[in-house]
Image (cartoon, coloured by chain):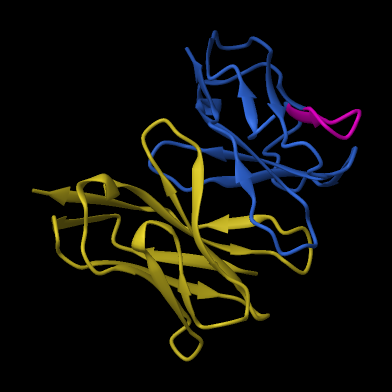
Chain colours: A blue, B yellow
């Protein structure tokens, strides 16, 4: 597609439920990043994929958070046993790393845990 | 570790006035620096980037920023504010020697009054 696509745009879930957030990158972009943006804050890094592998997952807050990118394209961020503190905007960004190019961001998924 | 600090969480200017948004960085290596803009309920859009070429960087929508190593600053300016400039602005530094992940500041909300 023309840009990074994130679905759903909004997700409301009950505390304790499982959610999946999807990111469709720009075609050909090998690097994919997930960020979390809490209200009134800047985005915070969660995880980075180069191709299919998670090259850096140091930003994942705990083991309830997991992400995959099985074919090196679409990525899914998975959150188990959601908590109210997980409520935030989840942003995906992609680029062609190593070529001094900018990261292109999707519109984000706003997750609300009630 | 790399970091950025944005001074002033809110800045208000009149339409036609100078816009100055402040960003200071900390980095043990020559930094790559970015300014992003975020409109309500949107993803992030790149305004401009510094990647060790010219210290005065021109971006989109009439914005520019100057890299000053002696002051560890990368302030964003625009000579004449427009109502459409009202948004949240984020300064970021890239971990370019590792994963290219972005480390963001806490953001500055720009309000433009008629």
Q: Is residue A106 left or right of residue B83?
A: right
Q: Is residue B114 visible?
A: yes
Residue at x-position 77% and y-position 62%: A99
Which residue in the rendered view is the most extreme toward the bottom?
B70
Residue B62 at what x, y percent from top left? 35, 63
Q: For residue B95, what is the image quadrant? A: bottom right
Residue A30 at what x, y percent from top left? 83, 45
Residue A13 at what x, y percent from top left? 55, 10
Q: Is residue B74 visible?
A: no
A59 falls in the magenta region = no
Residue at x-position 78% and y-position 44%: A29
A66 falls in the magenta region = yes
- Above or below, B8 relative to A96: below
Which residue in the rendered view is the most extreme toward the left?
B114
Residue B37 at what x, y percent from top left? 42, 50
Residue at x-position 30% and y-position 55%: B9
In the image, which residues are magenta? A65-74
> Is A70 in front, or is A100?
A100
- Above or below, B50 relative to A37: below
- Above or below, A43 relative to B15: above
- Above or below, B53 relative to A81: below
Q: Is residue A101 left or right of residue A54?
A: left
The mark total stands at 0
> Please, what is the dominant secondary structure of the magenta stretch?
loop
Quarter of the image with the N terminus of chain A is top right
């Amino acid at each position: 597609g023309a840009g990074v696509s994130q679905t759903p745009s909004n997700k409301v879930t009950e505390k304790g439920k499982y959610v999946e957030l999807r990111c469709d990158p720009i075609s050909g972009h090998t690097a994919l990043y997930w960020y979390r943006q809490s209200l009134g804050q800047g985005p915070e890094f969660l995880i980075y994929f180069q191709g299919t592998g998670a090259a850096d997952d140091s930003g994942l807050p705990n083991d309830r958070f997991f992400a995959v990118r099985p074919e090196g394209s679409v990525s899914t961020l998975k959150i188990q046993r959601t908590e109210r503190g997980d409520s935030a905007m989840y942003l995906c960004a992609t680029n062609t790393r190593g070529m001094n190019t900018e990261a292109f961001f999707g519109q984000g998924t706003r997750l609300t845990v009630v | 570790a790399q970091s950025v600090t944005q001074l002033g969480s809110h800045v208000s200017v009149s339409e036609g006035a100078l816009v100055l948004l402040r960003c200071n960085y900390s980095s043990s290596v020559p930094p790559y620096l970015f300014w992003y803009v975020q409109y309500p309920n949107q993803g992030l859009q790149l305004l401009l980037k510094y990647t060790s070429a010219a210290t005065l960087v021109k971006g989109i929508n009439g914005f520019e920023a100057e890299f000053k190593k002696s002051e560890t600053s990368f302030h964003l300016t625009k000579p004449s504010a427009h109502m459409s400039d009202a948004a949240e602005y984020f300064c970021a530094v890239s971990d370019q020697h590792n994963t290219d992940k972005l480390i963001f500041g806490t953001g500055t909300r720009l309000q433009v009054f008629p």
